[in-house]
Amino acid sequence: MGKFVKEILDKEEFSREDIISLLESEGEDRTLLFTKSSEIKEKYIGNKVWYRGLIEFANVCGKDCLYCGIRKGNRNLERYNLTDDEILAAARFAHANNYGSIALQSGELESPFVTDRIGNLLHRIKEMSNGELGITLSVGEQEPEVYKSWFDAGAHRYLLRIESTNRLLYSKIHPDNSNHSFDRRMSCLKNLQDIGYQTGTGVMIGLPFQTLNDLAGDLLFMKEFNIDMCGMGPYIEHADTPLIEYSESLMPLKERFDLTLKMIALIRIMMKDINIVAATALQAIDPIGREKAVRIGANIVMPNITPGKYRDSYKLYDNKPCTDDSAEDCQGCLEARMSLADAEVVYGEWGDSKHYSERRDKNTKNTENYKQ
Ligand code: SAM
């Protein structure tokens, strides 16, 4: 078996079957996969990690995704919305502690008020930090002109998980209505890329009804779409969501965790210079889950800098870690954790996706060639 996996790992491009074989790998084969992905990370990225101070600024959501704890239909949840000053204070903490970037995340709402509010916050954060803080947005599906206005206001990265690229699976984990359209989510991703954002996507791993073939399709999609950043994590059930009824059919949490590591290793091998997040959900399953992800390919960690009193209410899934900590607790804890993973935290840099700059340079060259 080892030889077979070694042969696959030596290929320039993986087929769907190759990916499935690697996702199935166990024992020595699994070690070969992880060794290869760590080598590639070392070569293309170095043993480094960049922070995105995560501000989960509101858990109010207009959508009803069947897996998500902050879905509109969940009445067992206190809703919150940080004030602009609280968001500014969290951004100031990130800047003062020399984090290169922050990420603003919330439930999904589309309205002129939200558009203006986020635009205004972007200006204020840029001004407060003398343009030094990089800003990732993750606030869901919006119209192209809204994305453009936020880009012009200073956001330069956007994370929008496609959740699953199998349309049928997507329809099983979302309500069947126009507010949860696969096509719209896909066109939002395209718009983000066209506007010029460093564009990130990802999927949940271990969903009910999901197969290895689906996951292979997800990886092939990310490669073909030419993403700059990837955020993938295990699906973890939440008691107050409709998908809880399929809990019995799920693979054990440890297997979901292991499969997530394999997915991270594979995307690192397939897309050598993109940014890959070590998702917090990994730590909900394994206390050193994020460190393991960093060892085998991830290079981005998102310390939670949301004010502590709100953290318990941004529960996407059960057993979300660190909800009792303060931003200061996260700071010390993560630094120690990353050194355990032999990774050096880089301070004071945006930590942009190398893939993005290469992609932009290539586009410029192509246009120049075309002009000549
Ligand atoms: N609303 C924005 C969006 O969808 O892009 C951002 C917030 S949303 C809560 C962030 C991500 O949480 C989703 O993209 C989804 O992948 C993840 N998530 C939601 N419920 C989850 C669960 N039960 N287990 C693991 N991840 C989950």
Image (spheres, grey):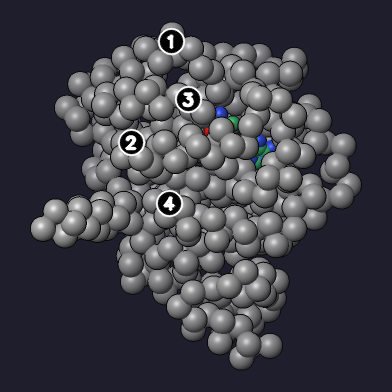
Report the Cα–Cα distance between label 4 and label 2.
14 Å
* Residue 256 screen position, x and y as percent: 70, 55
Dot 4: element: loop
Q: Nearer the viewer, residue 88 or 21?
A: 21
Residue found 36% across the figure and 61% down from its top: 273
Counting other residues with Cα less than 10 Å from the Cα at mark 4, is it few (<14), some (14-19), or many (20 or more)? many
> In the rendered structure, which amino acid carries the disc numbered 2?
Ile
- Res. 195 mark: 2
Q: Nearer the viewer, mark 4 or mark 2?
A: 2
* Residue 271 screen position, x and y as percent: 43, 63
Dot 1: element: helix
- Res. 315 mark: none
- Res. 142 mark: 3
Report the residue marked by disc 1. 112
> In the rendered structure, which amino acid carries the disc numbered 3?
Gln
Counting other residues with Cα less than 10 Å from the Cα at mark 1, is it few (<14), some (14-19), or many (20 or more)? few
Counting other residues with Cα less than 10 Å from the Cα at mark 3, is it few (<14), some (14-19), or many (20 or more)? some
Residue found 49% across the figure and 74% down from its top: 13
